[in-house]
Image (cartoon, rainbow, N blue to C red):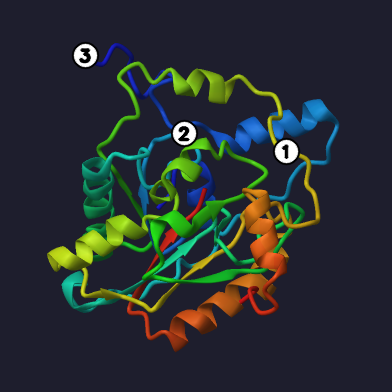
Amino acid sequence: MTSALDITRSVNPPRAAFLDYPLGHTTGKADDRSLQRAILVEALDAFTSLSVPGSVKMLPFRWSEDEQWKRSALAGGDDRQPRYDTPQYQSEDDRRRAEACAVCVT
Amino acid sequence: MRRQNPESSPVGSPIEYIKRIRENYARLGYEAYAWVDNTGLPTPWTPLTKPLGDCRLALVASGGIYAAGQVAFHWRDDTTSRQIPTTVRREDLRATHFAYDLADARRDPNVVFPIDTLRGLVAEGRIGELTANAYTFMGGIYSSRRVSEELAPRLTERLLADRADAALLVPV
C-alpha cells in the first residue's frame, strides 16, 4: 500500500496499490468498515492482477470531492514532533504496564 | 462533479512529497535528504502462483503500532519492531509516531494497521489465512542504510519463519 506515490516509485517495490489519502490513512478512513474492506479488496487484487514488475495500481477512491486536504498538505511548514529517544506511550497506563513487563520487546 | 483536471491541478494530482520535503529542508537550513532511489535497479519480482484465497498473508506496518503491555517506539531512528499476534484485540492496539497526525489511528488502528479488515477477508474466504503474527515498526528512520541492513533482514526472517506466502506492507 502507499499514499505517497512519488516515494514509492522511487523505492521501486515489486508491486503497489496507491490510495490518494492524507498520510495516516493508508488503509482507509476511521470507523468506516465497508470502505476499509473495499479498499483492501481492490488493493489485494494487485497481487494477482499486476504482472509487470514495478507496477502501481491506482485505487479508485477519493478522500473528498473537493480534495481540500491537499491544500494544507501542500502548505508547507514542519509539523513533526521532536524526536525523543525514550519510548513515547499513547498513555501513562501503557507505560506502567510495559515497565512492569520484562519481556515485552519482541 | 470533478471541478479540476487531475492532470494539471495540484489538488487533483498526487502530492509530490519528495519535492515538498526537499523545499522544506532547504527553507529550514537542513542538509538535503538522501531519498532511496532504486529506479535504476532491476525491480525485485516473485509472481504469486496461487489465488490469495489459498495464501497465508502477513501484515507489516510502519505506523508505530504497538500492543498494550509492549514497550512503545521512541521517535529517534527506532529500528526495533514489535510482534503482534494477529488474534490481537483491537482495543489493545496503540499508535505512536512523530510525523503524522495520530488522532484517527488511535480512534481506529485499522487506518494504518488493517487487522479487522484482513480478518474479515479471511472469514469471507478471499484470503486463505493470516500468519500467526503481524510486525510493526515506526517509520521515519532517517538512515535508509539502517533499514536495509538491520530492520528489513530481521523482518524478512520472521516472515519466512511464519511461512508467509505474501506480505501486505502498510507504510505511513
- x 53%, y 33%: residue: B16
Q: Secondary structure at mark 3?
A: loop
Label 1 crowd bin: few (<14), some (14–19), many (20+), radius 10 Å: few
Q: Nearer the viewer, residue B171 or A59?
A: B171
Q: In the rendered image of this protein, does residue B85 appear above or below residue B94?
A: below
Q: Is residue A58 left or right of residue A24?
A: left
Give how far across and how far down residue B28 sits, in percent.
82, 29
Q: Nearer the viewer, residue A75 or B138?
A: B138
> In whole angstroms, how far apart are the C-alphas of marks 1 and 3?
37 Å
Q: Is residue B114 left or right of residue B23?
A: left
Which kind of residue does numbered mark 2 sit on? Pro
Which kind of residue does numbered mark 1 sit on? Gln
**Residue B137 falls in which quadrant of the image?**
bottom right
Evaluate whether residue B86 shows in this view. Answer: yes
Label 2 crowd bin: few (<14), some (14–19), many (20+), radius 10 Å: many
- Circles 2 and 3: CB atoms closer than 8 Å: no
Give how far across and how far down residue B93 sits, in percent.
49, 57
- x 43%, y 17%: residue: A68
Read off the residue under disc 2: A22
Residue B1, numbered circle: 3
Read off the residue under disc 1: A81
- Please, which chain is the residue tagged with disc 1 on? A
Disc 1 or 2, which lies upstream in sequence? Answer: 2
- Circles 1 and 2: CB atoms closer than 8 Å: no
- Please, which chain is the residue tagged with disc 3 on? B
Mark 1 vs mark 3: in front? 1
- Please, which chain is the residue tagged with disc 2 on? A
